[in-house]
Amino acid sequence: MKYFFAFIFFSQFVFSQSPYPQDYFRSPLDVKVILSGTFAELRSNHFHSGLDIKTQQRTGLNVYGVAEGYVSRIKVSHYGYGKALYITHPNGYVSVYAHLSKFSPRIQKYIKTCQYDKESYEVEVFPSPDELPISADEIVAFSGNSGSSGGPHLHFEIRDNEERPINPMLFGIDVEDTKPPFLSAVYAYPKNKRAHINQNKKRTELRLIPTSKGDYTTEPIEAIGDIGFGVVSYDQQDRAYNKNGLSNIQSFYNGNKTFEMDFKRFSFDESKHINRFIDYEVYKEKKSRIQKLFVQSGNTLSMLKDVDANGYITVEDSTSTVYKVRLRDFKGNEAWLSIPVKGKRAKEILEAPELKPNTYIIANQVNELDQGNVSVYFPKQTFYEDFHIDFSVANDTLKLHKNTIPLMKSYTINFDIKNYVEDDKDKLFIASLYGYYQKPSYISTKRLGDKLSARTKYLGTFTLASDTVSPTVKPVNFQNGKWLSKLSTLKVKIDDDLSGISNYRATINGKWILMEYDYKKDTLTYDFDDNINTETENNLKIIVTDNVGNSTTFESTFFRK
């Protein structure tokens, strides 16, 4: 035990030392840094790559360059980061600012010129170092809610020269946090059929017992063989109620470290392995993310450290041991979990026979499935491990297991449509069916002759769907034939009820205009400050096309001085 606590003291000392500059970067906002999202927080199919800083539920707050440098990349997209700015600094790091409402005037002018040159709202450009230099404390943008943001905030990142995101708090971005992490559930996992936990050979939830000191324990478990554990845990900072991610998780068995996950830095290429780190099946079925404190095949996360025996412990008969878990946030607040483990061989455990589908997937080779008018192609190493897959086709509907198996890469679904009437073929697409009512959702579909093809990273149920209805286009803040001299923007609402909006094009008097598409509000917005319309009488024309080619043309005349 003396050795154990000496190790803990040493790890705390090492943890407190930082190779990252502490006084180089300022905060990107003037307001107090309160987080709605932390670095490496568990998100859908990825680890969060930055800090989500609250903006007091407002948009339009000044966003500052955190240090001198130059704008090295600007990306504007409908989804994802929305309006995003990248600044490269002399020390080699890159700061990223996302979900912006707009850029500072000179950057805004630069990017609008690019958008009009390309006649596209969505652009990505890489200015040279001398085009948009940034001085210290310069306002570079204004906070917003663009892209896939769920509410107004600033997404802020710091990346190294290999484009790997690093926790910005390592550079001195400070957040008030005096609360220890919370633990809401703990599970035990037998590694194989030779192991068991409390007379059970499957994942077992343990009864969690909070202690008076803010730590946790469980009732003693009886086990034998190789056992792993998993926890459901989160952290909360001061002044915020959001359930955020941890900074570090360690486990110990009889005083020896068996596992560590250090959420300090990662690469985007490995972020997909989050679905191997969590219990993906539980997440898809119960929306709870169990963090597994053991490592299975294919989990190559660089945040893993000091993993012994893949994080599993070996419990022998007639032994009494303790398994401990240390949960830590960035400010050093911590909570401990203690699990008493008694080695006790159980009597024979009877299990119901497991019914397995008759199609077997071998992960380390190409797998091709074919039935009726449907074929499926899984590239090598699409899956983490071999398993039996449920595969069947009936009435143009493909059942491909349940979406409870994580994938490493996309695979291809093909439908043969030669039996469809020629006029109907152009309106067909491949859709996934989701929810209680099995509503179809468009998957990007390509047609080559009589074959429709789509790529996806999810298992589930898929079908052929047909979209014959054109999108709708309606004016929001104007009427045909009216004077609009007092308006600063022109807004229309666009919508498509099945395959979704693919593209749009808008002109005034034949000249292309920049209209910003907000998919969350289904609106297109034109800013009159662009000064494209110089005539008194103006003809607005908007063509909106859905994903199977149905299009709607909207025209309106307005007057403006």
Image (spheres, rainbow, N blue to C red):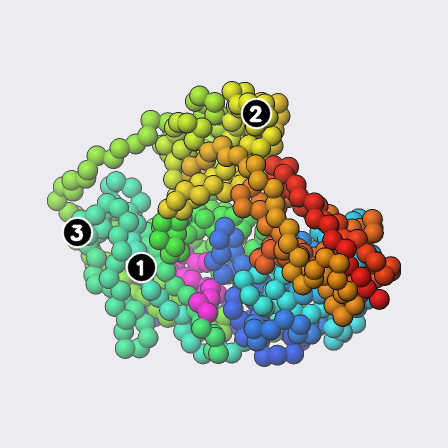
Looking at the picture, how far across and down is residue 51, in whole percent? Answer: 57, 66
Disc number for residue 520: none
Earlier-in-chain disc, 3 versus 2:
3
Q: Is residue 110 at all visible to an observer of this figure?
A: no
Q: Secondary structure at mark 2?
A: strand
Q: Residue at x 57, y 27 (%)?
A: 425
* CA distance separating discs 1 and 3: 21 Å
In the picture, measured across the screen, residue 232 lies left or right of residue 131, that is left
Q: Residue at x 39, y 55 (%)?
A: 287
Q: Residues within 10 Å of mark 2 (few under 14, many from 20)?
A: some
Specify the segment rendered in magenta: 242-261
Query: What amino acid type is highlighted by mark number 3?
Result: Lys
Residue 176 belongs to the span the image colors magenta: no
* CA distance separating discs 3 and 2: 59 Å
Closest to the camera, between mark 1 and mark 3, is: 1
Earlier-in-chain disc, 1 versus 3:
1
Q: Quadrant of the N terminus?
A: bottom left
The answer to whether mark 3 and mark 2 are in CB contact below 8 A is no
Q: Residue furthest left?
A: 347
* CA distance separating discs 2 and 1: 48 Å
Query: What amino acid type is highlighted by mark number 2?
Result: Lys
Q: As rendered, which of 78 and 382 lies closer to the eye?
A: 78
Mark 2 = which residue? 451
Mark 3 = which residue? 344
Q: Residue at x 51, y 31 (%)?
A: 413
Closest to the camera, between mark 2 and mark 1, is: 2
Looking at the picture, how far across and down is residue 539, in whole percent? Answer: 79, 53
Q: Secondary structure at mark 1?
A: strand
Query: What amino acid type is highlighted by mark number 1?
Result: Val
Q: Secondary structure at mark 3?
A: loop
Q: Quadrant of the C terminus?
A: bottom right
Mark 1 = which residue? 186
